[in-house]
Image (cartoon, rainbow, N blue to C red):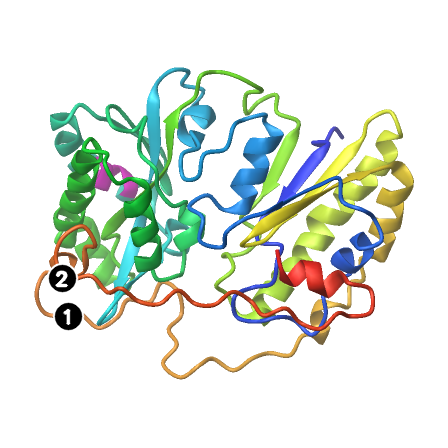
Amino acid sequence: MTVASHLIVAHAGPPLDGLPPEPPPLVRALHAIPPEAAHDGDPWSLTPPHEHALATALGWTVTDGALPWAAWSAQRVGVACAWLHPCHWQASLDHIQIVPAQALAITAEEAQALADALTPLAAEDGWRLYVESAQRWRLEGPALDSWRGASLSRVAHRRADPWWRRQRAADMGNPAGRALLRLLNEAQMLYDRHPVNTARAARGLPAVNGLWLDGAGVWPGDGPTPANADVALMEGWTDGPAVPVQDWSAAWQRLSDTVLVPWLRDAAKAGADRPHRLTLCGQRGWRRWRLDRAQCIALARALDTTWAAAIPTAAPADGARAPGVPPARHSGPWWQRLWPWGGRRNPGALPPPHARRDDDGHGAATWWSAL
């Protein structure tokens, strides 16, 4: 079986909920191998480290919040594109949390109906809307070539207002973006009482009441296409960094068993004539290793299947709500009260980054907790 020679693992740093008692075995084993390259970034950058790492592997110049993933994925050379992600905007008294489509069980029929309702509004400003999947749509047209925004990966299952502030600062002075903001605002009002959401409420499902836009820009056609890129990104193995430690640890164990060990074994079989690279990404940056055959074999052997079982289960915090469960409905049109480009805005405070834990004797915990 032919596998990508470069594997990029998103969310491989510690989850935001806290640090496991010890780093995963792969992290401890990699500490003995000097990294080939590293990127130390900003935990509040619009582009998450795994997208930065992928763009670097593709030979792109990285501009924060402006990587043309939608155009590249669709192979639309020279066309301004962006992704629209249907979401549940979970409103609280002073902020909004974004629940992504992956947690909403949106059907293809629901997605098509919601997209069809938005299409005439998009067409008024010259945009064309395409449903790529129930979880992701593609928008094409003006203003998308200069839009800078936070990746959905940054905001999924997290409060959105810190990212709105960063996004507004990055996009300041771009009058073309106002039409995009108006479209996103109109989508919220359109979906508030849409029949799709009425039916979902009857089934006890959260509403699809908003959209998140990312992956905007123009792909000039440089570098490999998605079909011939010799790099693979593992992103969906977890719901992201905003998950309990126990859930993250169990998901990492599944990733190790089903992806990492098979990839390392296949890499070892490929021999010395085909170098392999492994990149681990956190919330701040990434590290990349070039691995030879002996190192791939040693790493595969180091992955202990009993690691996740040792992570204690944490009790949920008071008032915690499972992702995808809608909150109590507030009176009045909440998008007017909480929409960050008009009306009341909660300044909030950016949470501090992870504190570094003590070195584990090998140094692995230090660099891993700083990812």
Give the magenta-colored segment's residue range: 111-115
Provide residue 214's location: percent of width, then percent of height. 36, 39
Q: Nearer the viewer, mark 1 or mark 2?
A: 2
The answer to which of marks 1 and 2 sits earlier in the sequence is 1
Residue 85 appears in the rendering: no
As helix, strand or loop, the secondary structure at mark 2 comes to helix
Name the kind of residue labelled 2 in the image: Arg
Which SS does the magenta portion mostly show? helix
User: Horizontal placement of 298 versus 42: left or right?
Assistant: right
Q: Nearer the viewer, residue 221 or 174?
A: 174
Tell me the quarter of the picture where residue 134 sits. Answer: top left
Q: Residue furthest left?
A: 332
From the viewer's perspective, tell me whether residue 30 is left or right of residue 197.
right
Q: Is residue 7 left or right of residue 81?
A: right
- Going by the numbered disc 1, the residue's amino acid type is His
Q: Which residue is labeled 1 in the image?
A: 330
Q: Quadrant of the N terminus?
A: top right
The residue located at (15%, 62%) in the rendering is 344
- In percent of width and height, residue 52 lies at 54, 39
